[in-house]
Amino acid sequence: MSTTSSNPAYDIALQSVAPGRWTTFAAPEWRNPGGGLWGGYALGLCVRALEAEPEATGEVLSMTLTYAAGLPSGELDVRTRRLRQGGSIGVWEVELRPQGVEEVGVHGMLTMARRPPTAPFAFATLPQAPSPDQLPSPDHPAGPLHFGASAFERRTLDGFPPKPGGDSRSLAWVRPRNGVWDKALLAMVTDNSAPRAMYALDRVMTTTLSLTAYLHASVEQIAALGDDFILIECEGRVGGGGASDERSSYWSRDGRLLATSEQLAWYRQAPPPVPE
């Protein structure tokens, strides 16, 4: 059985080979400059796998991914396992690995939930930011888009890579390039901001160790966004001993908090260039 997303911004086919076992093809457009797949791809793939899982109930509410090793583009094996199912809450494990390899590349723990009608409340407020229409659309003269730029248009006052300074906070408007928002794309965008070590140090090389995303918005609330911009508020607090943190919030234009995330990254500095 093959399950294909109906969202053209993130189209993926999952081929069922056994209960809890799937294969998929990760296109080379999802690679980082270093060659491995962009971390956001794994987030979206985990959501898609549970959307295709016939035993899963509800929608993804939270997810924690551990990036044990880089995933290459090409054929991947996906394994899903239900750990517990209650009346409203289910806990699932998802493993991603290159096809034919036993060692896990990315391990995910995901909470699924039915969303009952409850009285809403909010303490957080949308930060002040220029309208996305007042910000330039980025140009990509270097050729094909990779590592998330193929899925999302990003408008911000910050350049890339960021320049080291005294503040790690950034604001950016982001929207899908080729389709509309859904649960998988909201998960993917939680790994769309530049590593915070780049706001402190020159010549940084970095990779994600773990990322936890909380997807507060329901499927219906996400669908109501269409292909509109959402605002990403991101900041880092501390780095040292090779590890740095990052936390982010994701807002609709009308002030709804759609998602939040926490990330731990591994970083090191490249040596300075040798003078000629």
Image (tube, rainbow, N blue to C red):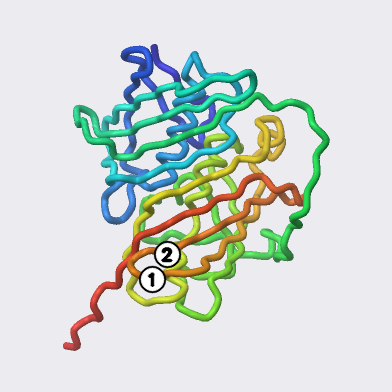
Question: Which numbered disc covers residue 244?
Answer: 2
Q: Quadrant of residue 108?
A: top left
Q: CA distance from mark 2 to mark 1?
A: 6 Å
Determine whether the residue tagged by mark 1 lies in a helix, strand or loop.
strand
Residue 62 pos. (x, y %): 56, 38
Which quadrant would the N terminus be assigned to in this image? top left
Residue 139 pos. (x, y %): 48, 61
Mark 2 Cα shell of 10 Å, populated few (<14), some (14-19), many (≥20):
many
Is 149 situated above or below 100?
Answer: below
Is 83 situated above or below 97?
Answer: above
Question: Which numbered disc covers residue 76?
Answer: none
Residue appearing at x 27%, y 45% in the figure: 69
In the picture, measured across the screen, residue 144 lies left or right of residue 8, that is left
Q: Are marks 2 and 1 in contact (CB under 8 Å)?
A: yes
Residue appearing at x 54%, y 45% in the figure: 213
Q: Which residue is mark 1?
A: 240
Residue 60 pos. (x, y %): 56, 31
